Image (tube, grey):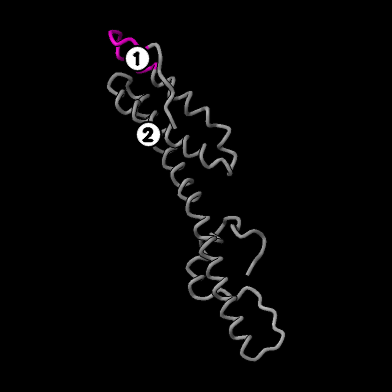
Amino acid sequence: MKARKVTGLNPDGPLEKNLRRIVSVRLKELRSFAPAVGDPTAVQALHDMRIAAKRLRYVLEMGEPALGAAARRGAKEMRRIQDLLGEIHDCDEGVPRVLAHVERLRAEDSAAMAGLAGRGAKDLRIPSGPPRRALRGVRPLLDPPGARSLRGSRRR
């Protein structure tokens, strides 16, 4: 994501005035992603929002001597927002990988059961095999305590 251009800066003007202008632009940039907050499919927008929060945080941290305690509080809040958006991004990246891994394990189970069935059963329908030990470590990721299942309403 490309940063919004900050216009109207005066290199010969007061530092505080220039910093306030930069903070204003960075804050508008951050707020422009507000509609994405309620949309779990807005993966890229939420990632871009994290980058915008980081830019604002850095300006506030560097400008604290000129802007005072408000800049320190703002930087602290931006760090909190940035961390939260980072956790969301980690989930956006990790969940599809976990689900793909589960599907591979289930396919292996089904293939193993089909091989066993071919040795003696005449007409055995092969369901997705029961989760094996490898799935035990993945199950908490699929159904974390207190969270909605990532697998939908189907329970195993």
In front of the other: 108 or 41: 108
Query: Crowding at label 2, few (<14), some or many (≥20) Cα neighbours within 10 Å?
Result: some
Q: Which x, y percent locates residue 13?
A: 30, 8
Upstream in sequence: badge 2 or badge 1: 1
> Which numbered circle lies on residue 141?
none
In the image, residue 38 sits, relative to residue 69, either above or below, namely: below
Q: Which x, y percent locates residue 45?
A: 52, 36
User: Where does the magenta region start and end?
Assistant: 9-21
User: Judging from the image, what secondary structure is the residue with disc 1 in?
Assistant: helix
User: Judging from the image, what secondary structure is the residue with disc 2 in?
Assistant: helix
Q: Amino acid at mark 1?
A: Asn
Q: Quadrant of the C terminus?
A: bottom right
Q: Which x, y percent locates residue 66?
A: 29, 18
The residue shown at (56%, 36%) is 36
The residue shown at (60%, 81%) is 113
Measured in 3D between alpha carbons, the distance from the residue under mark 2 to the one under mark 1, in whole angstroms, is 21 Å
The residue wearing badge 1 is 18
> Which numbered circle lies on residue 76?
2
Q: Quadrant of the N terminus?
A: top left
Q: Amino acid at mark 2?
A: Lys
Image quadrant where residue 124 sits: bottom right
The residue shown at (59%, 76%) is 110
Q: Nearer the viewer, mark 2 or mark 1?
A: 1
- Find out whether residue 19 is within the magenta segment: yes
